[in-house]
Image (cartoon, rainbow, N blue to C red):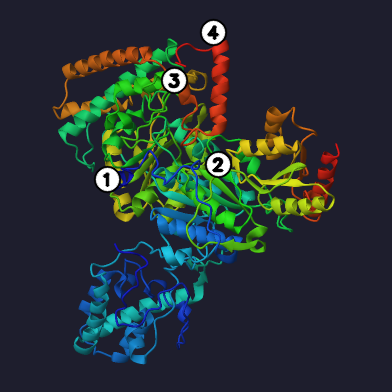
Amino acid sequence: MGDISAPDTDVINCSTPHNDKITTLHYPFTLSALPNNHNFPRNDKTTTQFSSHNSSLFWITRGLSLHFLPLPPLFLISDFLHNGRLAREILHLGPPSGKDVVDDFSGRRRMPEFDTPPWNLESGRHCVVSIRLVLVLYDPCHLSVILYDVLSNSMRFYKELMLALDFPGGKVMFVPEMNFLPGSTSERINCYRVLDDNGQTFSKSKFQELSKEDAVKMYTDMVTLQVMDTIFYEAQRQGRISFYLTSIGEEAINVASAAALTIDDIVFPQYREPGVLLWRGFTLQEFANQCFGNKLDYGKGRQMPIHYGSNRLNYYTVTQIPHAVGAAYSLKMDGKKACTITYFGDGGTSEGDFHAALNFAAVMEVPVIFFCRNNGWAISTPTTEQFRSDGAVVRGQAYGIHSIRIDGNDALAVYSAVHAAREMAIRESRPILIEALTYRVGHHSTSDDSTKYRSTDEIEHWRTARDPVSKFRKWVEGNGWWSDVAEEEHRNNTRKELLRAIQMAERTQKPSLSELFTDVYDQVPRNLQEQERTLREIIKKNSNDYPSDVPV
Amino acid sequence: MAMALRALGRRISHSDRFFSSLSEAAKPPSDGKLINLFTAINQALHIALDTDPRSYVFGEDVRFGGVFRCTTGLTDKFGRDRVFNTPLCEQGIIGFAIGLAAMGNRAIAEIQFADYIYPAFDQIVNEAAKFRYRSGNEFNCGGLTVRSPYGAVGHGGHYHSQSPESFFCHVPGLKVVIPRSPRQAKGLLLSCIRDPNPVIFFEPKLLYRLSVEEVPEDDYMLPLSEAEVIRQGSDITLIGWGAQLSILEQACDAAAKEGISCELIDLKTLIPWDKETVESSVRKTGKLLISHEAPVTGGFGAEISASIVERCFLRLEAPIARVCGLDTPFPLVYEQFYLPTMNKILDAIKATVKY
């Protein structure tokens, strides 16, 4: 859309002072009271004189009036009240002061969103002025137009003269009585959904089309994730790994959001998004290696299970929301056609860095997708104890971010929303907030027993009736792309492969002791070298006290 | 290879930094103009932005030049995309900086006063310091440098005078660097910016205008993790950093009048700190005095003291003295009573020498 700091080309070549200062001009009228959106300089979106009124009304009045003579003085008055461009040219005056678009004197400008007629180009303003001039001189119908303009603009003129105030940040209309904005709207923000409970699309559903290949890959990855979660959970219960955290109920969020991105989009996950890695090609062996913390783990055995990371797949080791914003700024500065995405739960939106990140993303204008997995629970804390706002989606708007609420158990909705968000984010270099409503079917982790704070009926309902995997399966099968045979085969193969991977991972050695001291800094500093020496001496004397599976 | 990777548009997991902090750097050339501390820092930032097109300077009020003028002229020269204001949120500043650094850029973030660094404490300690370690070196944010004015200024009170360096000295993965003068500041800051680890650079705000020195105009770097003996002596070793060194120097001069020869060491990098230089000095003198503005309990002087006792116990001829701030919040009208002033240090020197 163009660089917002590029100077505007004024229609009639008035020299537009393009800077942060307000220019006040000496006018017969009180200039500061001129209608807001008829002042320039402008941003990429321009308004024309016609935007101030309903354009169909304009044509109607024009068409109906047939008997009036053109009256140049009336035209001049009308023109004056719009922005006086022509009149100013004639009278050798400069442009009026404009404050609607310049905020905080920074020169960075924000245009309010409003409808513009088709001719809202820079050159369109030339057209507009020329048309009016022609109409005045040749078209007897013009007087009605002028009268209409005069009237409507007088109303606005009066309104803004009487009721608008200049402040840093722009003009505001003031009101004589107090009106508190309600803390919440009477109706919750609507939720975008494509598939019904039977896996059929609604008649009016609009969604991003999926190829058979992608749909089948999405489905099989969702199944793989389910199988992986079940088996790793069992492995933890058997004491083979120390910890695990499932994504049951959120398979659609995991896989469909990943499917809508490209490999160049950078992922800053929380911890319930291994499906994103799965989609990108992380193997079951690699997952197992990290869970067992063996020497093939990219994390070198330093972190608890499920803290996956892969530089090759652009998936940062479990990290935090503001990092995605800085990384998105880097992408923008490097001119990459990519965005970043960061995931977090409903609980995560209460943390300070969520608010910091959204605010920074909006101000810095970076291509980042904030994906909130609102699954109803932050360990044992339900959303009623987490916030009083209408979920996370309204918070995006508070920071000036386009936001959407979607059904997180609907793979097509997730896919479409992330696809659209990505396009918007990259094309307009802006952040997008997606709140996916879903349910955390599993416990928070293997250290949690959620039946202590919620009913098993509730869990069962979401596990069965609202399962995203079976819902998507119905849609995929409905297209003739999947079958029961394929299902059984895939589940069996995945299970076998996973059990093999776990066995391999279990047998693989742990990383050697020296990896305890590396990567604290880029090189091992002297104090750590000394500590390593001391530690090795102690181990030599007391080798029985130390785990035998870490090679010294 | 690093350049090729960058050309492919991928993040660089192993840093492409020019050198590691432990390598030797040339001594700075001795010629130069007389400038003060904030000008020296300004020069360093100019050079950093000039030499690496993927470096950024940002923070609160950075764009117009900063509340201490350290960033004047940068926006005009390098543009608003590279030198910019951030919203008023330290947590966001450092979180944003970490993300930027993780993508292979040099992120030079400013925290307006060290007193305000605490909202960013989680980001610094849990994220920046552990970024490389926790990912098994798949990722790192070595390009991160946090600059912040610290220390007493005469009238700063609780929230414009703090010295929080010891909090960060307790965090493996970070480096903490404190310059004593303009020439040191420029060289050390350039080293910090180019060091492939997250570094916190505390600038003694009292010295921004007060300290004037000849500083070479060109690009030079001073090594990190190397302490400097700035005055040779034989009777007692004095250690300090930042603005406190000038107080220690005055104490040295006063002690010399009484026949005590003091060896003065500028620690420069607090972690990882140069134990060898300090140890060899204490082996020479047998006595040690540490002085810092931060409160004495849990201050970095405690770490130095404990380490030197471990290494030099039998050589020490007197208890290690610490002349530091009191264990109170930094007061306003009582500032001169609170601070480790020259007379307190001189008394401690004499007591230690005569032990």
| Three-letter amino acid code at the position of disc 3 | Ser
Q: Disc 2 is attached to a residue of which chain? A: B
In the picture as drawn, the residue positioned furthest to the top comes out as A544
* In-image side of A493 versus A326 (left or right): left
Q: How far apart are marks 1 and 4 (CA)?
A: 50 Å
* In-image side of B77 versus A251 (left or right): right
Q: How far apart are marks 4 and 2 (CA)?
A: 36 Å
Say which label, 3 or 4, has the lower sequence index.
3
Q: How far apart are marks 3 and 4 (CA)?
A: 17 Å
10 Å crowding of disc 4: few (<14), some (14-19), many (20+): few
Disc 3 target residue: A512
Q: Nearer the viewer, residue B354 or A38?
A: B354
Q: Is mark 4 on a helix, strand or loop?
A: helix
Disc 2 target residue: B175
Q: Disc 1 is attached to a residue of which chain? A: B
Disc 4 target residue: A544
Q: Is mark 2 on a helix, strand or loop?
A: strand
Q: State the quadrant of the C terminus of chain B.
A: top right
Cβ atoms under marks 1 and 3 closer than 8 Å: no
Q: Which of A391 and A309 is in front in this view?
A: A309
Give the foreground label among 1 and 3: 3
